[in-house]
Amino acid sequence: MIRGAIDLPEVLPEQKNDLSEAFAKGWRVLVWNDPVNLMSYVVFVFQKVLGFDENKAKKHMLEVHERGQSVVAIETREKSEFLCHRLQEFGLKSTIEANPA
């Protein structure tokens, strides 16, 4: 062994699968309907948090209102968790789920 060298841990095959799944854009961010937030506020939050233009924000807001939910993003797990948390900070009910293959 070389002096000062560090042995790196071995990555097991199942860990490689976990890592590749986490970084795949296979996670959906869902926003759910609630009786609290005004439609105009939901449009504002979609624009602020998700960067939607007004038309796209209104489309997703109406989908939430009429269907009870809308998939507002499909991202990596980390990014989906971040977006979900940001939406929740603004008072919207949101969750993430694995995107069905």
Image (cartoon, grey):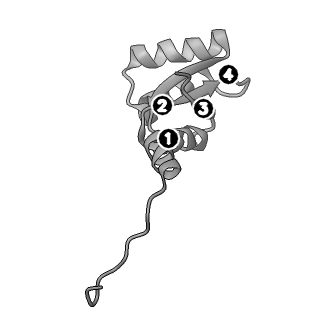
Is 92 situated above or below 15? above
Helix, strand or loop at label 4? It is loop
Left-right relation of 4 to 84: left
Q: Residues within 10 Å of mark 4 (few under 14, many from 20)?
A: many
**Residue 33 bears which disc, if any?**
4
- Disc 3 and disc 4: Cα gap in Å? 17 Å
Q: Residue 40: percent from the left, percent from the top?
A: 54, 21
> Given the image, on which type of amino acid does mark 4 rest?
Asn
The answer to whether one can see residue 8 in this image is yes
Q: Which residue is identified by label 3?
A: 97
Determine contact: label 2, label 3, CB under 8 Å. no
Looking at marks 2 and 3 on the same chain, the residue that comes earlier in the sequence is marked by 2
Q: Are marks 1 and 2 in contact (CB under 8 Å)?
A: yes
**Which residue extends farthest right?**
35
Secondary element at tag 2: loop
Q: Amino acid at mark 1?
A: Arg
Please give the name of the residue rendered at 44% of the width and 38% of the height, measured from the top-left corner.
Answer: 76
Mark 1, secondary structure of its residue: helix
Mark nearer the N terminus (1 vs 4): 4
The amino acid type found where label 2 is placed reads Gly
Measured in 3D between alpha carbons, the distance from the residue under mark 3 to the one under mark 1, in whole angstroms, is 9 Å
Point out residue 51 in the picture as x, y percentages from the top left corner.
38, 30
Kindly identify the amino acid type of the residue bearing the numbered disc 3. Answer: Glu
Q: Which residue is mark 2?
A: 26
Whichever of labels 3 and 4 marks the residue nearer the N terminus, that label is 4
Residue depicted at x 55% and y 17%? 61
Q: Residue beneath label 1, please?
A: 77
Number of other residues with Cα within 10 Å of mark 3, as a class: few under 14, some 14 to 19, many 20 or more: some
Residue positioned 42% across, 36% down in the render: 24
Residue shown at 50% from the left, 52% from the top: 15
* 1 or 2: tag closer to the N-terminus: 2
